[in-house]
Amino acid sequence: MIDRAIEFATKAHEGQFRKGTRRPYIVHPIEVKEIVSTMTRDEEVISAAVLHDTIEDCKGVTREVLALEFSPRVAAMVAGESEDKSRTWMERKTATIQSIGNAPREVQMIGLADKLSNMRDIDRDYPKVGEELWNRFRMKDKKMIGWYYKGVRDALAKDFQKEPVFQEYCRLIRKNFD
């Protein structure tokens, strides 16, 4: 199932790049899969990690499509990690912070892995491009971006504080936003 998810996500994200770079987008879902794999061996959760951005970012991919291609459980996890792009940045990020703390553990793992992958990108690129980095994002205010990552951290702290990937996430937040 994981190999099928990688193949599906690769096709779905074809032609997409990480914000402000020429890095193929698929490197992000693959990294999210690798991070989730440190927390679970559940193939459906790992597959959902690879597919986590397909509903919100890829044409023609819906919860129903993922349920048919993979399983209703995989589809539910991807839907649980997806944002409604019709809402403003602030509305979407506030909703994520409010919901992730009470989400099923599988969705929390995928969310944490997604945010850690993003923080790794920020940590890698910030020293190279400096303050210009923030212009890559819809929200260009570093303080607001930090508010979001700290909000996710705080929502997940109780359940994930002992996880090495959570500790790395916290370390990268301190390094780049404090």
Image (tube, rainbow, N blue to C red):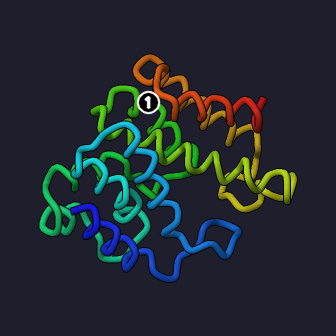
Seen from the viewer's position, the closer of residues 70 and 83 is 70
For the view shown, which residue lies furthest in the bottom direction?
A: 15
- Quarter of the picture containing the N terminus is bottom left
- Residue at 79 percent across and 57 percent down: it is 133
Which residue ends up furthest to the top in the rendered image? 158
Residue 106, image quadrant: top left
**Which image quadrant is residue 54 in?**
bottom left
25 left or right of 144?
left
**Residue 44 in picture, x, y percent from top left:** 22, 51
Q: Quadrant of the C terminus?
A: top right
Q: Is residue 148 above or below residue 81?
A: above
Give amino acid for label 1: Gln
* In the rendered image, the vertical position of residue 108 relative to residue 127, given as above or below: above
Indicate the secondary structure of the residue bearing disc 1: helix
Which of 89 and 152 lies nearest the eye of the viewer? 152
Q: Residues within 10 Å of mark 1 (few under 14, many from 20)?
A: some
